[in-house]
Image (tube, helix red, strand yellow):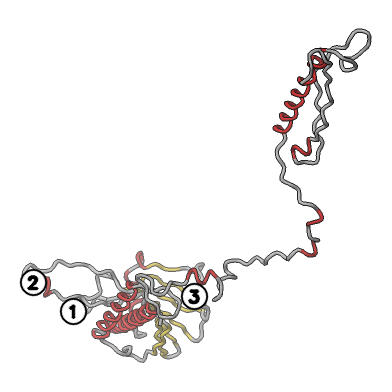
Amino acid sequence: MAAPGAEQRCFPLPRLRLSKLLGAPPPPPKVTLGVGLEPAPQRGGRSAGSGPSTSGSAACPRLAMLLARALRAAAALRPALPPRRPLSSLPPRALLPPPPLARSLWQRSDGGGWRGALLRPRRGSAGGVSCGCGGLHTEGDKAFAQFLTDEIKEERKIQKHKALPKVSGGWELEVHGTEARLVRKVAGEKITVTFNINNSIPPAVDDEAPEEQKPDEQEEPDITSTPNFVVEVIKDDTKQTLVLDCHYPEDEVGHEGEEESDIFTIREVSFQPTGESDWKDTNYTLNTDSLDWALYDHLMDFLADRGVDNTFADELIELSTALEHQEYIKFLEDLKSFVKCQ
């Protein structure tokens, strides 16, 4: 501690580098003190720090305090930067490892990829049955397959025709899936009848049963297929084909004993180019709803003379029903194999 009356000196503060405080290379901002903070000059041209003075000695601690405040304020305003990595520690670009190749989920779906293991059902999982095919199998699938097995057995029991029945009159049958074609040649003419069994079963109608008949004694009605069919008449010396679109009216099917009633009707009549599979919509089409009855009767006689009559229509229903039942059983077998993954 200095003795009373001794002269007090203000030693200069060591210069602080703001870069050391902030950890960044830029120099610290220049701090300018206000006019009021500088010591007033002494009379005679001497400054406050040039000689012993009481006011100069008192301003040194205040100047240090203001400088420290300014440094702290500048450090608070500048965001902290991460420490820089020395350039000497970075490897050359040529020595860096290459980036991994990007592969999509679809490319990773092979046997060794993680996607296949993710989608593959776990062995022994709850409710799952594994057959080694990699597909999903549940207890519901097992019950479904058993139901289909029983259904196929019952359908085979009630199947009337193991083979497709023939149509009388010399008609040759050609079957392509659900589509069938009957062909007949008579005296320079070729008659072709084409039909498809899809959507050929009319909707079931619940008739009121007699009161004295018990529900258990009611017999289930036989399912019959009544498809629309197209008759094409082709003459050898013409380039046109007469096309007649026929169908079975719902109120006429199943009524027996009415010999004069026709069980099928002609709906439309048109001419189409011979040998072309795609018919032209620009050709005129005659609708029989507004046709004269005499002209309609002649068209029906025209078909009857070529073997398309009520007898043919009955046999066509029997053939279509047998074909539909055969395709239905085949569909059940395919569905069972699909569910069981065989």
Question: What residue did someone put label 1 on?
Answer: 257
Residue at (36%, 68%) from the top-left corner?
288
Residue at (73%, 46%) from the top-left corner?
83
The quadrant the C terminus occupies is bottom left
Up the image or down, 330 lies above or below 249; here it is: below
Residue 253, picture quadrant: bottom left
Coordinates of residue 147 in the picture (x, y in percent): 28, 77
Coordinates of residue 178 in the picture (x, y in percent): 39, 80
Q: Real-space Cα distance between discs 1 and 2? A: 26 Å
Circle 3 sits in a helix, a strand or a loop, which is it? Answer: strand
Circle 2 sits in a helix, a strand or a loop, which is it? Answer: loop
Give the mark toward the camera: 2 or 3: 2
Q: Real-space Cα distance between discs 2 and 3? A: 54 Å
Question: What residue did someone put label 3 on?
Answer: 272
| Residue type marked 2 | Gln
- Which one is in front, 51 or 2? 2
Left or right, residue 317 beside residue 233: left
Residue 134 visible in the shown view: yes
| Residue type marked 1 | Gly
Q: Real-space Cα distance between discs 1 and 3? A: 37 Å
Give the mark toward the camera: 1 or 2: 2
